[in-house]
Image (cartoon, rainbow, N blue to C red):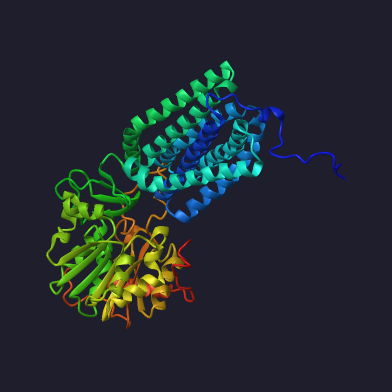
Amino acid sequence: MIDPSEPAPTGVVGPPEDLEPARLPVRAGLGRLLVLGVVFVCAACGLVYELELVALATYLVGDSVTQASVVLSVMVFAMGVGALLAKRLRCRAAVGFGAVEAGLALVGGASAMALYACFAWFGQTRSALVGFSLAIGILIGAEVPLLMTLIQRVRRQDAGGAVADLFAADYVGALVGGLAFPFLLLPSFGQLTGALLTGVVNAVAGAVLVLWLFRRDLTSRARWALLGVNALVLALLAAGMVLATPFERAARQAVYGSSARVAVQTGIQEVVMTGGTGEGAGAGRGRKGFGGPLALYLDGRLRVSSETEFRYHEALVHPAMAGGPHRRVLVLGGGDGLAVREILRYRAVRSVTVVELDPGVLRLARTDPGLSRLNRHSLSDPRVRVVTEDAFEWLRQQGTSARRPAPYDVIVSDLPDPGIAASTKLYSQEFYGLAARVLAGDGRLVVHAGPPVERARLYWTVDATLRSVGLATVPYRVPGRPASFYGGPDRASRPLPLVDAEVPAAAPSAGRGRYWGFLLAGRHRPRFGLAPDAPPLAGLGREELEAGRRGAARDRIWGLPASTLIHPRYRG
């Protein structure tokens, strides 16, 4: 029973040394505002570290859902651990906060560079990703208890009001950090320099709070120790910023080899091109010249190899051109111009519309000597119209515009693999429904649908999704190398092979079970084969196509659900 004569405790109860009023160089009101300002800055930096880990891991490994889940779950757990560990530092909150911020600035600022180094030289990133998420989460979790102690030492306040002020500054800072990362840091500075610059801001904010505002709380030894630690952290981060470009060049060479000659960040993806500068190097058909065969990488995944791409593009385009007219053709994706090259080999083609999201890829396809030679300058043909837009949004606009365009005889879907999370909407029921609206009554739609043997469930889910919008399908496959879903092979064990993630590594002998899968669809079951006016093919024949159709049909998996925007089914 509580003795009514004893007053109920108010405010925050804790050890007396925790809440002894601080001797500040400014008035308490201004001091409190400065503490909340540091809370704001630290929250912004913490969210930038989190987003940077998710973005870089997604770029290096793929599968944004998994990477975000790993980073967020590990980091939130670690924040709880950090909050518990910070209880031991409350008696010396100023020194503890200064040490935490210096450590957070160094670990968070260097995390992108370290993660990229693990990928480039050791061929794996998962353990490094978990380790950095854990370390950053622990340090972020330790901030709030220490800041709560410091703000109460500036001016005593009831616990509810102090928590409200602290979290308000924290959440607003997180908003600013979350917006600054995609709209300022990433486009202006890139992944590596952006993270390092955030670390500098983080270190300066922590140092100003502790070494100036709470300097009278520090012993001379603690003050000099924090000054030395912060100076070392700032020097390391500055050195990282100076060396970021040479480091990135060395890491890129470790990943792609010494022949990388183009490396640009387009704002949508990183585009790297190797080889293809010598006579014949970009001409395909396995010919080699000075500089080696051309290879085009998008976000670390090999998409085009001039030695082998013709087999993939012939298998993608030519069956769709059979079975009916092909005067009007729509290409979704295909910004490299290689599918368009095959389409323009038909004299009956009158117009080709290419819808490509990345203007940087289109620019390279037009201007790069090796790639433009490989695609035979197809995007400069007067019959070709190029639209720089997301394929999903463009198709939706065609259905809602007052003046609907004439339907297309052939639609070629030359898009990234459905196994890559960012591409799942381009293999959804909604997407194929939009495509069917612009398809002529006797038109054909052809889709690159992933490896039919290695990831059979993924391939047949695409088939089920096409059939769910009322299209009849003809599955077929061509021997080759499956797409690299997770950023390529282990670079520590063997060099990255010059093979296209969408095209075979070699002729049909590339390996048992190594196929690309395609789906030919129409409102009525399309006639499968080659058109009477088909040009001579260098990599495929009628017999091989027919064998691919029979082989794919033999392995069909029935009863799979369609993939939708709300319920994507392309994982695993």
In the rendered view of the protein, which quadrant contains the N terminus?
Answer: top right
User: Residue 323 location, x and y as percent?
Assistant: 24, 80
| Residue in the picture at 42% in, 65% down | 453
Q: Is residue 495 visible?
A: no
Question: Height in image: 452 above or below 197?
Answer: below
Please tell me which residue lies in front, 470 or 348.
Answer: 470
| Residue in the picture at 33% in, 51% down | 269
Q: Residue furthest top?
A: 220
User: Residue 71 location, x and y as percent?
Assistant: 51, 48
Question: Height in image: 547 above or below 235?
Answer: below
**Image quadrant in which you'd find residue 334:** bottom left
> In the image, 7: left or right of 226?
right
Q: Is residue 99 visible?
A: yes
> In the image, 456: left or right of 381?
right
| Residue in the picture at 58% in, 35% down | 147
User: Residue 359 location, x and y as percent?
Assistant: 25, 55
User: Residue 280 location, x and y as percent?
Assistant: 15, 50
Question: Height in image: 435 above or below 203?
Answer: below
Please tell me which residue lies in front, 477 or 273.
Answer: 273
**Image quadrant in which you'd find residue 402:** bottom left
Please tell me which residue lies in front, 237 or 6.
Answer: 6
